Image (cartoon, rainbow, N blue to C red):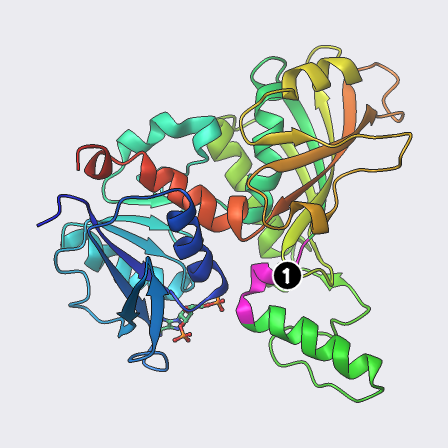
Amino acid sequence: MSNDPVVAIVGVTGAVGAEFIATMDRRNFRIGKLKALASARSAGKTLQFRGREIVIEELNENAFRDVDIALFSAGGSISRKYAPIAVQAGAVVVDNSSAFRMDPNVPLVIPEINAGRIRDHKGIIANPNCAAITALVPLWPIHRQNRIKRLIISTYQAASGAGAAAMEELVESTRASLNGEAYQPKVLPHPYAFNLFNHNTTVDPETGYNDEETKVIKETRKIFEDEKIAVGVTCVRVPVLRAHCEAITFECERPIGEDDVRKLLAGAPGVKIIDDRAGNYFPMPIDASGQDDVLVGRIRKDLSDPSGHSISMFVAADQLLKGAALNAIQIAELLPQRVMA
Ligand code: A2P
């Protein structure tokens, strides 16, 4: 009998589910047994893991018996129902949905920022929103040296954040458009090929903010443990397959220059600077796809703030990796169940 943990993946057939498997494999995550869970639609199908065929099982209330670590990425309502059941059965849950992120009893963790919070968990650890992770990984080394008091983010978010079916819709609708054929959107609310639109989450009729924007604001405050940081966000879905980009402008308490930011970010964990002005080469989704790091470039003075306290930059990160599966696996790697195995 192996002492390595039994790991369940809930949503194994989804876009993030596939990356959980690939990321664990790539990082030699030790696993005694893998339980592959999805809906009844997928039950009985098989997948390959480390040279073995694994049969996908239907998620049900008995699925977590003997499970040590459960990685969830099947949407908020599945997490709300089944994460407590998994905890009851003795598993530690790393949840990629938004269901528990703002629960004061649930740590919201980006390991490069607040790995120490993992110790506080009571069974569930939440993986932050992908747009929040993408911004906060490179902002943290700055914030901890020279507090960011105001932050403005505009996102360019890929199809992957809306799941495998949305990625397929982008490909299919682009093909249809090139062939001059009509295409009826099924997953996203608007035509996706050669278009962009407000993030496909509910818009608050009072404030005009969509849910994604609200998540970024609240999660930034929780992860930075700074309730006073002022955050303005605009979240937009763009026709890119799997990496998010963000234009970020931030204002610090003390003056800050471009070179200060470059120094703080050079060698910062999870960050790679791509900032070639002569070659006009900066972070792009095509370069971020398949990469673990958040790419950071276009680091420059914010000319709208002559006081010298503000910087603008442009970032790109793989939504499925650092924005989801990689961050969750990094958390799971730090769990005592695994360290002691
Ligand atoms: P399935 O493929 O069987 O529908 P994505 O985020 O890429 O859209 O993937 C969603 C994941 O969540 C898929 O693995 C999907 O499984 C899974 N899922 C959706 N609904 C359920 C459900 N009711 N029970 C278990 N898994 C579900």
Q: Position of residue 73 (x, y in %)?
A: 41, 59
Work out whether residue 95 or residue 19 is closer to the camera in this orientation and state it.
19
Q: Position of residue 135 (x, y in %)?
A: 62, 37
- How crowded pointer 1 is (Cα within 10 Å; few <14, some 14-19, many 20+) is rated as some
SS of the residue under disc 1: loop
Residue receiving disc 1: 203
Q: Quadrant of residue 242?
A: bottom right
- Image: 252 above or below 6: above
- Image: 210 above or below 191: above
- Residue drawn 79% across and 18% down? 258
Which residue is at the far bottom? 181
**Ligand 1, image quadrant it occupies:** bottom left
Which residue is at the far top? 254
- Image: 88 above or below 288: below
- Residue 189 visible in the snapshot: no
- Residue drawn 55% across and 41% down? 292
Which residue is at the far front? 51
The segment highlighted magenta reads 157-164
Residue type (three-letter) at the residue carrying disc 1: Val
Which residue is at the far left? 1
Q: Position of residue 293 (x, y in %)?
A: 58, 37
Q: Position of residue 233 (x, y in %)?
A: 69, 44
> Magenta stretch: residue 159 in it?
yes
- Residue drawn 34% across and 48% down? 94
Q: Quadrant of the C terminus?
A: top left
The verdict on label 1 being within 8 Å of ligand 1 is no
- Residue 198 visible in the snapshot: yes
Left or right of residue 108: residue 201: right
Which SS type dominates the magenta stretch? helix
